[in-house]
Structure formats: structure tokens, C-alpha cells
Amino acid sequence: MTLWKRLLRLVAIVILIPAMFLLGCQSSLIYLPNSYREGHKTMLSAAKGARVDFTTSQGRQTAFYIPPKARAPGLPRTIWLCFGGNGALALDWLPFTDAWDERFAYLLVDYPSYGDCAGKPTPGSIRESSKAAFKALVRHLNSTRDELQPRIAVLGHSLGSAAALMAADDLDARRAMLISPFTSMTDMGRIVLGWPLCHLNLHRFNNHKTLRHVASRAGARIVIFHGAADEVIPARMGRELAVAHPLAVTFHEIPEAHHNDILALIEGRIGQTMVEIMPPQP
């Protein structure tokens, strides 16, 4: 074998090995599923919450409905669909919901393979699960889609911001709160892996595209919070999303907040913003 052929083969090996590795283990780099502990069940019971079971192409799925603490006849005025980050579980929202307005209800949604859910997480399976969870909630509340849809708002952190935006797009929700959102998964790959490996991304979450759909709808109001010290998803990504839609999106940069402590740091501001953009009835 000539020298140039040996060099060419070496270059091919150097390029193909990391590419094959990324294609093979990509899911494990993006998603970090966890299982529930006994403490989660105790919290769910204390919140008088209920499992909402449903089935998708991924198998059996479970979300959790948390009714308003201030009980009133009829349906809740507002139901927040909440989506966690890549290592979080749906019931991890419970300590936060306990501090927010007592007139709000919540649907806490897990992703396939998270918690008690079967299957594998992908943008498509997460989107399918969110739509099916809403349909299951309609049945759980003995309601109709038309009656429940105007009451829906979405909240997401990190990966959950992408899930929340997809849910808002599919359910025509006009109110959203995004905490530490990225612009696209390919852009995140560019930060972590550089070019051209970022284009091997198979999980093409694109918040630019989905936010454009949601923000273009009449009456849309979206609020973004992002930590100035976020070491995972830079604050410039949240700012970039907001700048693209100045009439519909408000951006707040939180000094000294990191990726994993921002929810605790702004717990009160999240609750206040919920009331501002989706006020519950007295």
C-alpha cells in the first residue's frame, strides 16, 4: 500500500471513529432518565395529585395531575403543563408548585423512559407523549378539548423548554415560560463538539422554529429567564430567542444564576410571572 493511501485510511479512521461513537451513544449524552423513589409518591399523595395513564407508540406512559389547592367548583381556570430538564422527573416540580398560586392546577409530564414511562426519548416521541398526555387529562377531568385548551399554559426548564414549546405549538397554547432554553440542539452540539460533528445530531430540537410558530399567534406571550452564569446553555441563546420576537417574548437575565440552581433562585419570580401572564380567576 502506498504512503498516500495509508495516510488517507488513517484520516478516514480518525474521522469515522468519533462519528460512529456519536451516532451510537447520542441518546445517552442528551437524555438522563431517572426512576421514582418512595419520597416522590409521598409528595404526590400530599399534593392530592393523581396519576394520568395513557399509551403511545412507546408503550405505557404516565403524567401527574395536581389540582388547585384552593378548590372551587368546575374546571381550573389555568392548568400549567410542566416539563423538566434532561435529568429531572415530572414530580420534581412538586416543591415549586406548592409555593405558587393556589388557584393553579398542573399537569407534570415525564418523557419516554423517565419515571414510570416506557420507550425511548426523541423529539418525536416526546411530542407524541405531550399530545397524548393532554388528551388523557381531558378524559381525567371529564372535559373536552375545546373547553380545556384555552386554560393551558406551558413551563419548561432546559430540555423541557423545547418540550414545552412543542406542546404549546401542538395545543395552541398562547402562554409560555421558558427557563434556560437553547436555540437548537445542533447549536448545542457546536458548543460541545464543534463543527462539523455538531451536524451529526439526530435529535433535532429547534426552538427557533417552534417559537416562531407559537409567537406568531394572536395574543401570544412568552417569558424567558436565563442565568447569566449558566455553564451549560449560554444566556446568549435565551436572549437570541427573545430578540427574534420582541412583541411576544420578554427576556430576563438572572445575575449569578447557573443552569441547575436557577429554578430555586427565582422560584418566587416564576410564580409571580405565572399570575401576570395567565391570571387565575378570583
Image (cartoon, rainbow, N blue to C red):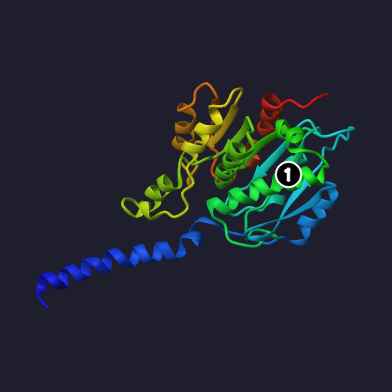
In the picture provided, is 91 more to the left or to the right than 124? right
In the picture provided, is 99 more to the left or to the right than 56? right
Secondary structure category for the residue under label 1: strand
In the picture provided, is 21 more to the left or to the right than 107? left
Camera sees residue 251: no
Can you say whether 38 is above or below 209 in the image? below
Q: Within 10 angstroms of label 1, few (less than 14), some, or many (20 or more) residues? A: many
**Whole-percent x, y for residue 57 in the image:** 62, 58
**Whole-percent x, y for residue 36 in the image:** 71, 60
Q: Nearer the viewer, residue 11 or 236?
A: 11
In the picture provided, is 39 more to the left or to the right than 200? right
**Whole-percent x, y for residue 1 in the image:** 12, 78
Camera sees residue 17: yes
Can you say whether 173 is above or below 31 in the image? above
Quadrant assignment for the C terminus: top right
Q: Quadrant of residue 187?
A: top left
Q: Quadrant of residue 254?
A: top right
Q: Quadrant of residue 200?
A: bottom left
Amino acid type at image mark 1: Leu
**Whole-percent x, y for residue 168 in the image:** 61, 37
The residue at 48%/45% (across/down) is 231
Name the residue beneath numbered marker 1. Answer: 107
The residue at 57%/58% (across/down) is 32
